[in-house]
Image (tube, grey):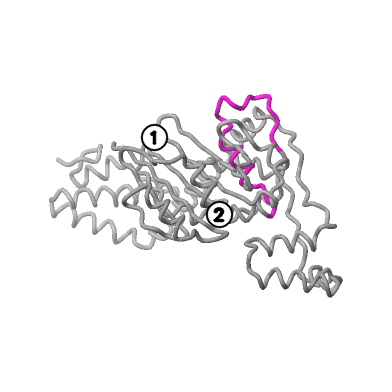
Amino acid sequence: MSEYQYYEFQAIDRPLTAEEQQAVSKLSSRVEPHPRRAVFVYHYSDLRANAKELLARYYDAMFYIANWGTTRLLFRFPRHLIDVKQMEPYCVEEYITCEIINDYVVLEMQWNVEDGYYDWVDGEGYLDGLIGLRDDILRQDYRVLYLAWLAILHTWKIDDEDVEPPVPPGLQQLTPALRKFIEAFHLGEALINVAAAASSLPTSITAAQLRQRIAALSRAECDDWLLRLAQGQEAQLSLTFHRHLCADEPATAVTPGRRTVAELQTLAEAEAERLKRQQAAAAEAQRIRELEAFAPQAEASWTFVEQLIKQGTSRSYDEAVQLLVKLHQLATHRGRKRRLPAVWAKFGLRTHGGRR
């Protein structure tokens, strides 16, 4: 398999200037200058820049995937809008890092599979589905950080005795962006269900409460906020204004981490078994529904089987065997089991489903 690396950068808060676009395009002859996006694909060689430094200088989000098994998701945030201390409990060296670079905070989440990806890998379109996670973090919604921590439980960086970080609310209600992250970082359903069991329900301030707080602002305060809006120089003004209105609102409840890694893995194994039984039961129920739908055609199918056998072709024999098996399953389901060997003998077929 040939090498494959995919880098995608996106600018969210502001577009790149013409000079910045030219600087980025010089990194590769195949990258056209663009104010919001840059994509680099390599089948040999590599990006002629440090990806994290390139993000910190020009962009707000980056997605990277390589077919040898590495996936990376990075976000850049204005430093004054991020509480690094709240994010630190989720950080794990080499996998989840939060770094202050000049006026920004750069968050990186990484996932690795030791033996690489066996299937075809294509990074196109992933970042579009993950961009919403940046706004979540700016609103102090750390569900993606907890999920990133869950994704690396198998690594040597985390011990069985380690206790999980704070469990954010809302893990029972996953957004499309969170589901895209789960897909990109290969998180299993069982582990997510176990995590969600300790997650509280999210709370949010209502529109009526926001109106009350806005009505309580002085004329001077309103004018100040409207002026900042009219100047259009603050990309996250809506977030800043919302935080101002809700400054006295209690923080959303976060469940303190209580379960060890070993306990989470034991619970996940039990949940995986439950899901397996549930899926088997659903598959059996579907099989029964299909048999019942087939039942009115059963008698006519016996005649059709005879016609197929008389045709004597490989394809007609295969179709006849499939019908005979289905008729046998229907008879078994209804308690009128026929012996298939006798049926096959009647039509001149061998008992293993082959042909004379």
Relative to 238, is 63 on the left or the right? left
Given residues 33 and 73, the one toward you in this image is 33
Q: Residue at x 67, y 73 (%)?
A: 230
Q: Quadrant of the N terminus?
A: top left
The quarter of the picture where residue 212 lies is: bottom right
Residue 173 location in percent, x, y?
Answer: 64, 54
**Whether residue 97 is situated above or below residue 307 in the rendered picture:** above
**Whether residue 64 is situated above or below residue 307 in the rendered picture:** above
Given residues 175 and 70, the one toward you in this image is 70
- What's drawn in magenta, residue-wise? 139-165
Q: How many marks?
A: 2
Q: Name the amino acid type tagged 2.
A: Ala
Disc 1, SS: loop
Relative to 199, is 152 on the left or the right? left
Which residue in the protein does label 2 denote?
177
Q: Residue at x 69, y 42 (%)?
A: 84
Residue 139 location in percent, x, y?
Answer: 69, 55
The quarter of the picture where residue 278 lies is: top right
**Residue farthest to the front, as pictured:** 19
Q: Residue at x 18, y 52 (%)?
A: 316
Q: Is residue 287 magenta?
A: no
Which residue in the protein does label 1 denote?
68
Residue 181 location in percent, x, y?
Answer: 53, 48
**Whether residue 301 is situated above or below residue 142 in the rendered picture:** below
Disc number placed over residue 342 in the picture, else none: none
The crowd level at tag 2 (other Cα within 10 Å; few <14, some 14-19, many 20+) is: many
Q: Is the stretch drawn in magenta largely helix, strand or loop?
A: loop
Residue 59 location in percent, x, y?
Answer: 52, 52
**Whether residue 143 is situated above or below residue 231 in the rendered picture:** above
Q: Residue at x 64, y 25 (%)?
A: 160
